[in-house]
Image: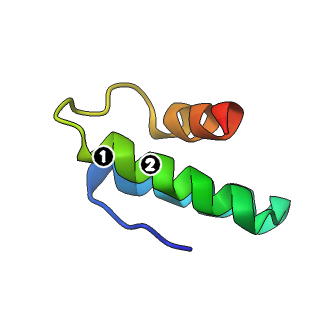
Amino acid sequence: MNVRQSGESGACSEHLDRFFASYGNTKMQKAAMKALCFVVAGDEPMRGKPEGWAAGIVWIG
């Protein structure tokens, strides 16, 4: 599942794709991509490193 955005959100999505390519949990991957979509849809810009956002989404999920 690929969710492509520009800038930090695109990089975050790429980190999630790499993680789930090796982890292989489709249900969790869908939930993570949905969470990323909610974060991207917000008014606030994503601050920090994309890999930090990806790790946080996986950690919370």
Q: Residue furthest top?
A: 48
In the image, which disc is placed on residue 51?
Answer: none
Q: Position of residue 4 (x, y in %)?
A: 37, 67
Residue at 80% in and 62% down: 25
Name the amino acid, label 1: Val
State the mark number for residue 40.
1
Q: Is residue 33 left or right of residue 41?
A: right
The percent position of residue 36, horizontal first and vertical second, equals: 44, 48
Taking depth in this image into account, of 13 and 49 the one nearest to the observer is 13
Tally of marks: 2
Compared to 54, does 19 lie above or below? below
State yes or no: discs 2 and 1 in contact (Cβ < 8 Å). Answer: yes
| Label 2 residue SS | helix
Give the answer, above or below, for where 13 lies relative to 43.
below
Corner quadrant of residue 48: top left
Amino acid found under the numbered disc labelled 2: Leu
Q: Residue at x 50, y 72 (%)?
A: 2
Q: Residue 16 placed where, x, y %?
A: 60, 54
Query: To which residue does mark 2 refer?
Result: 36
Callout 1: helix, strand or loop? helix
As measured in the structure, the alpha-carbon distance from the residue carrying label 2 to the one carrying label 1 is 6 Å
Residue in the image at 59% along x and 31% along y = 56
Q: Nearer the viewer, residue 18 or 40?
A: 40
Q: Quadrant of the C terminus?
A: top right
Q: Residue furthest bottom?
A: 1
Q: Is residue 19 left or right of residue 13?
A: right
Q: Which x, y percent locates residue 54?
A: 56, 41
**Extreme residue in the left direction:** 43
